[in-house]
Amino acid sequence: MPFYSIFRFFYLLGTVNALFFAFLIFSRSNRKRSDVILGVWLVFLSLQLVIPFIYMSNIKALGYMIGYESTLLALHPIFLYNYALTLTNEKRKLKSILLSFIPALMVALSMVGFVEMSSTEKFNMVTKETLPPLSVFPSFILSMTVIVWFMVAAFRVLKKHKKQILQVYSYRDDVDLLWLRRLTVSFAIILASDLALGILFIFINVPMPFADFFFYTMLTIFIFLLGYFGYQQGNIFRFEPLNIAREAHESHAKEESHDQKAEIPVINEADAQKLSALMKEEQPFLESSLTINDLSRMMDMPPHQLSRVINRHFGKNFFEYVNQYRIEYFKRLAVDPKYQHYSLLGLGLECGFNSKSSFNRVFKEHTGLTPGAVRKQAEAETVSQ
């Protein structure tokens, strides 16, 4: 039937995409642990799609496949969690990664009784000829618990990363993992939708092919985006500066805790003045890829000490501190006759912003206005003077 041919096409497309991107990632000469996790995850995602491809080719095989499909589904949030962790911290130990898969093993063991049922019994349950046995529900609850737990854990990892980069980088493009946060949200929606459609199938007789078509079509799109952006992320940027800064900040936090208990001042006014003078005279903020490690070398000061000066004395994180200088410099250039022929983006690049998106976003966050509105405001103030 043409309808089932569409199913098989999407399943095959998703499988090929997953294996293709896994091949590209494993072929990379400088691959790291995060790449390996992503590559293995893509292989398991391809297996997830192979199962329905087989039983859509031969519906009799459906009875044999049920159980394995649900077991595989519990693996994906664990892969997502480990990928997010290792992408932002390559020092995560292999032992910790392997131990995190124990809950998936528990799900698989809980499904043994169900998997060992005859294919006829399972097929009758899917076609609603008979009701599922009560022994299936503990497995279902365990599987849902594992999925929800690791999805929430992945969200927390990405949220923490988003906060950390503001203490280390003066830019966010390619390092904020916005693409992965969005894909994580999308994956959560896909899983929730699959659960909702499954419940509707049980109670109000929504056709199972419709539920499967939606889920696996969305999963195919997810696989393509995950493979593409994951491969690009590996080529574009590595997070070594963040790893270095993380260690410094952990030491910094311990020192601050000790200082607070001992009631010792943690800010040196001379350091703050030296930093302000450096920013005004040498203008390091004009370097679009500036990090706290770069600035700390210019200051001849450990990164954690510099971070403490910025946080405590200026009341800002590193990202906010550097970009306030870029905004002020933009206002100066906006009224400089030599730069009147520059476009807004051209001015932004002159001020240290590295892309149009970051340029617009920083202005909106820091001033509540667009760069164009700030330029007009600066010109109006000059005229009035």
Image (cartoon, grey):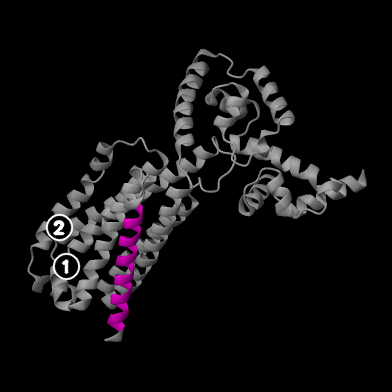
* Circle 2: element type: loop
Q: Classify residue 178 as left or right of residue 152.
A: right
What amino acid is found at the position of numbered circle 2 in the picture?
Met
- Judging by the rendered image, the residue that carries numbered circle 2 is 111
**Upstream in the sequence, badge 2 or badge 1?**
1
Q: Quadrant of the N terminus?
A: bottom left
Q: Amino acid at mark 1?
A: Met
The x and y percentages for residue 106 are 18, 49
Is residue 283 visible to the viewer in this orientation of the structure? yes
Of the numbered discs in the image, which one, if any, rests on residue 65?
1
Residue 53, horizontal then vertical, whole percent: 24, 72
**Point 55% across, 30% down: residue:** 293
Q: Where is the C terminus found, in terms of image quarters?
A: top right
Find out whether the residues at labels 2 and 1 contact each other: C-beta distance under 8 Å.
no
Residue, x 86% and y 47% (percent of image)? 337
In this orientation, does residue 129 appear?
no
Q: As drawn, is 1 to the left or to the right of 228? A: left
**Span highlighted in magenta in the image:** 3-25
* Residue 12 located within the stretch drawn in magenta: yes
Q: Residue at x 77, y 53 (%)?
A: 342
Q: Nearer the viewer, residue 139 or 284?
A: 284
